[in-house]
Image (cartoon, rainbow, N blue to C red):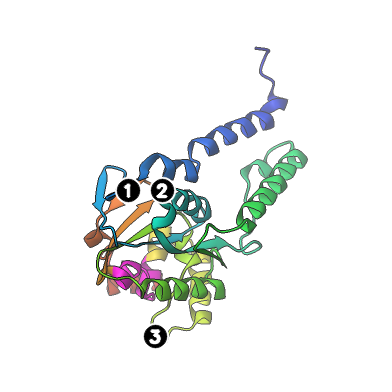
Amino acid sequence: MGALLFKDHISHLRAIRRAALRAADPAQAVERHLRLSRSALHAGPHRIPLEPSARIWLVGLGKAAPAMSAAAAEILGGRLSAGVVTVPKHGTQAPSDPLLRHEGRAEAASMSRSRTQGEREAASGPAPPGVQFIQSEHPTPGPGSLRAAHAAATMLAQARDGDLLLALISGGGSALIELPLPGVRLSDLQALTRQLLASGAAIGEINRVRRALSQIKAGGLARLAAARSNCISWELRSISWLSRSTIGSVLPSRKRHRSAIIAR
């Protein structure tokens, strides 16, 4: 191996990024942990029994949802009844590649453009059979976010006793799907989100406010189907498996905390 030269740092960073992306590939993560047998769905260390008549419903949220959902649909095959998956709408989030802040700016910019083109091709590819891809906005929710929520609610209204909801969640889901409380307009939610993002509030604080104004957060998605079906959720961030009861009560909001965040 030759001497390492500082001028090669962009190519080194590129190799490191490629290796990191391969290690965290969302589709491969699903393939490693999700398995279907004749009588059960095996999700990580958990075995969820399935009756022969049980149907599986899929909801994918977040920026990695298309890849995760495509892998899950391949595994589930004919047992998958339908799915709703958010796809990030291009042009709603400014690129922020740290490589652009280093020397070799032209090469780094070319890398960023290539990656964006690859993401466009992946997002515009065909959805798996029975799965609906819905383009929605990030980091500020938009009309697509509402369409995704309404589509998920309509789909889950068909759930019946013994069915299973599989929710695949990754970063960005808080904005990509939204169903505000009655009386909360999308324009109000957008204005508040922009103010919170500009305020320097931590993401946990921002999400606490978001949950307080949403019908679908803080377990709301699971509640849409919980009366009729079992629910299991997989967070790509930590590969954490949540029981049905945990999903329904994740991080309940507290009014005094919300008021303090907004006032600050």
Residues packed near mark 1 inside 10 Å, few (<14), some (14 to 19) or many (20 plus): few
What's the residue type where badge 2 is placed? Arg
Residue 91: name its quadrant.
Answer: bottom right
- Residue 213: say if magenta: yes
Start-end of magenta stretch: 208-225
Q: Is residue 99 left or right of residue 63?
A: right
Residues packed near mark 2 inside 10 Å, few (<14), some (14 to 19) or many (20 plus): few
- Using the rendered image of the protein, determine whether residue 98 is visible from the camera's viewpoint: yes
The quarter of the rendered structure image containing the C terminus is bottom left
Q: State yes or no: discs 3 and 2 in contact (Cβ < 8 Å).
A: no
Residue at 58%, 36% in the rendered image: 17
Q: Is residue 193 above or below residue 119?
A: below
Q: Is residue 68 above or below residue 132?
A: above
Tell me the CA gap for discs 1 and 2: 8 Å
Q: Is residue 181 above or below residue 31?
A: below
Frontmost of labels 1 and 3 is 1
Towards the viewer: 48 or 214: 48
- Mark with earlier residue (1, 3): 3
Q: Is residue 120 left or right of residue 19?
A: right
**Residue to which mark 1 is pinned:** 240
Towards the viewer: 17 or 228: 228
Secondary structure category for the residue under label 1: strand
What's the residue type where badge 1 is placed? Ser
**Residue to which mark 3 is pinned:** 182
Q: Is residue 23 left or right of residue 51?
A: right
Residue 237 - label:
2
Q: State yes or no: discs 1 and 2 in contact (Cβ < 8 Å).
A: yes
- Could you say where residue 135 lies in the image, as x and y percent from the top left? 58, 66
- Residue 63: say if magenta: no
- Could you say where residue 64 lies in the image, as x and y percent from the top left? 50, 52
Q: Is residue 143 left or right of residue 77?
A: right
What's the residue type where badge 3 is placed? Pro
